[in-house]
Image: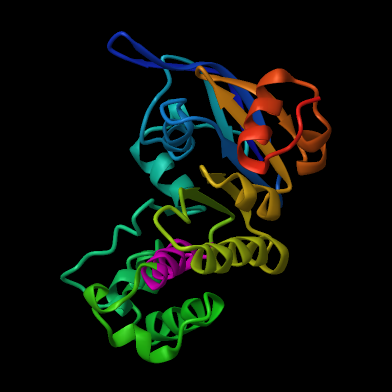
Amino acid sequence: MIEIRDVAKRFGSQVVLDGVTLNIEDGETMALLGPSGTGKSVLLKHIIGLIRPDRGEVIVDGQHVEGLGRKPLSKLRRTIGYVFQNGALFDSMDVFENIRLGLTDPDEFGDPDYARERVAECLEVVNLPPETAKKMPSELSGGMRKRVGISRAIAGKPKYVLYDEPTSGLDPVNSDIIDALVRRLNDDLGVTGVMVTHDVRGAFRTADRIALLTGGKVIAVGTPADFHESTNPEVRAFLERDFDLEPI
């Protein structure tokens, strides 16, 4: 379980998070929605310990992330996969080596047979053929690069996967493929997911619950059905813009 308690963060004079409180239950996929600059990606970085809050607590499986030293934090990160917005593949490495970097256990990383087997498994999970392992990132389409990024994130068999705009820049067909993949990781592998996205329709298809961030605060949390039925003016404005719903 991920617990975020009254987390605040500012950069200079800019307040990015202003007292965010949110729980992500084991086994669910939570989508973080909101306008640009509302701190969604910053919140992900707090969960994995890349950023420490100015105030508040981030607790993952009972561990206070902001207070962990280097070794305990490194151990915790082995349970968390991270999918970067642009895939963040290393252009000088082939797909095999990019995915192999996701093996967070040193023994597994150093075992060539295990690495080959695990990379093949991860490519199969994201519906890419085995020969993809030999390709360079420059040979892949945008959708394939995103799927390789997800393969790397799950290579270490994490309990949690954090997705930073996984469908950004993709056409509708490839966006649907990624959304279906995120859902399948949750349903088939039991992965707990936290997904930052601007794709409201994709969030409604993919997430068990949705949190709407505005002005550095969580203003609404609920299921997609809860959001459709909400009378909160800010939630309605969001839905009317993206779903062309009639105002209540």
Q: Position of residue 125 (x, y in %)?
A: 55, 77
Q: Is residue 224 left or right of residue 16?
A: right
Colour setting: rainbow
* Helix, strand or loop for the magenta stretch, by majority: helix
Q: Residue furthest top?
A: 13
Q: Position of residue 202 (x, y in %)?
A: 61, 53
How many marks can you see? 0
Give the residue displayed 21% in from the left and 73% down from the top: 93
> Is residue 144 inside the magenta stretch?
yes
Q: Residue furthest left?
A: 92
Give the residue displayed 84% in from the left and 33% down from the top: 229
User: Image quadrant for the N terminus?
Assistant: top right
Give the residue displayed 41% in from the left and 64% down from the top: 146
Q: Is residue 120 left or right of residue 21?
A: left
Q: Residue furthest bottom?
A: 131
User: Image quadrant for the C terminus?
Assistant: top right
Bounds of the magenta segment? 143-157
Between 34 and 208, the one lying in front of the other is 34
Q: Position of residue 6 (x, y in %)?
A: 58, 16
Q: Is residue 127 left or right of residue 14?
A: right
> Is residue 64 inside the magenta stretch?
no
Height in image: 156 above or below 80? Answer: below
